[in-house]
Image: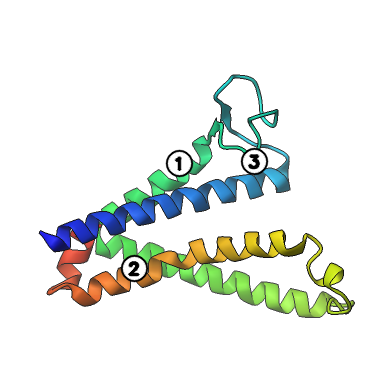
């Protein structure tokens, strides 16, 4: 019974963190594309007062779709999930390598000259970036901790999730 309660709490933690990350990705998509597909509670189109990225008075169907797809992938079990995770990891590695190579090739300025140059959005921008990175990786510690306590992790962890 204690393991079930722990699994439920861990699953809820991941659901809340995943929802936050999905909404964050949607606002970043809106900044890049200029298209923000949200439903304002008071009606009308975003962005407007009380229906912008600073307030939470909107429904985000794209973030919900990302969360549903991620949940379905996990619900499929270990086999298909392993393939999706492997493909996503390979894609992330390619993107990171591309960013490192492209950034190194295109680097022409000294960004460490001043704090305004290094962090143009100030401390708030740094904390925003750090929170995005932390929520992106929050799942690794929880799942490995849960798996280390299970008697048969290959069988029990997918069922718990």
* Residue found 85% across the figure and 67% down from its top: 116
Q: Callout 3: 10 Å neighbours few (<14), some, many (20+)?
A: some
67 relative position to 146: left or right: right
* Residue found 50% across the figure and 35% down from its top: 61
1 or 3: mark nearer the eye = 3
| CB-based contact (under 8 Å), mark 1 and mark 3 | no
Q: Depth check: 59 or 102 in front?
A: 59
Q: CA distance from mark 1 to mark 2?
A: 23 Å
The quarter of the rendered structure image containing the N terminus is bottom left
Residue behind mark 2: 142
Which numbered disc, 1 or 2, marks the residue that appears first in the sequence?
1
Mark 2 secondary-structure assignment:
helix
Circle on res. 53: 3
Mark 3 secondary-structure assignment:
loop
| CB-based contact (under 8 Å), mark 1 and mark 2 | no
Compared to 114, does 84 lie above or below? Answer: above
Circle on res. 122: none
52 relative position to 82: left or right: right
Place of residue 91 in the rendered image (x, y in percent of width and height, measured from the top left): 53, 68
Q: Depth check: 71 or 90 in front?
A: 71
Residue behind mark 1: 65
Compared to 12, does 111 lie above or below? Answer: below
* Residue found 23% across the figure and 59% down from its top: 7
Place of residue 51 in the rendered image (x, y in percent of width and height, measured from the top left): 63, 31
51 relative position to 14: left or right: right
């Amino acid at each position: 019974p204690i393991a079930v309660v722990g699994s439920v709490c861990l699953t809820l933690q991941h659901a809340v963190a995943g929802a936050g990350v999905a909404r964050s990705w949607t606002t970043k998509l809106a900044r890049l594309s200029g298209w923000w597909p949200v439903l304002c509670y008071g009606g009308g189109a975003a962005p407007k007062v009380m229906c912008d990225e600073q307030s939470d008075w909107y429904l985000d169907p794209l973030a919900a779709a990302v969360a549903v797809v991620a949940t379905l992938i996990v619900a499929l079990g270990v086999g298909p999930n392993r393939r999706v995770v492997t493909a996503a990891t390979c894609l992330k590695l390619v993107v990171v390598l591309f960013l490192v190579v492209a950034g190194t090739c295109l680097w022409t300025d000294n960004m460490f000259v001043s704090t305004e140059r290094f962090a143009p959005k100030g401390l708030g921008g740094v904390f925003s970036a750090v929170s995005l990175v932390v929520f992106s990786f929050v799942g690794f510690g929880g799942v490995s901790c849960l798996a280390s306590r299970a008697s048969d992790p290959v069988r029990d962890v997918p069922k718990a999730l």
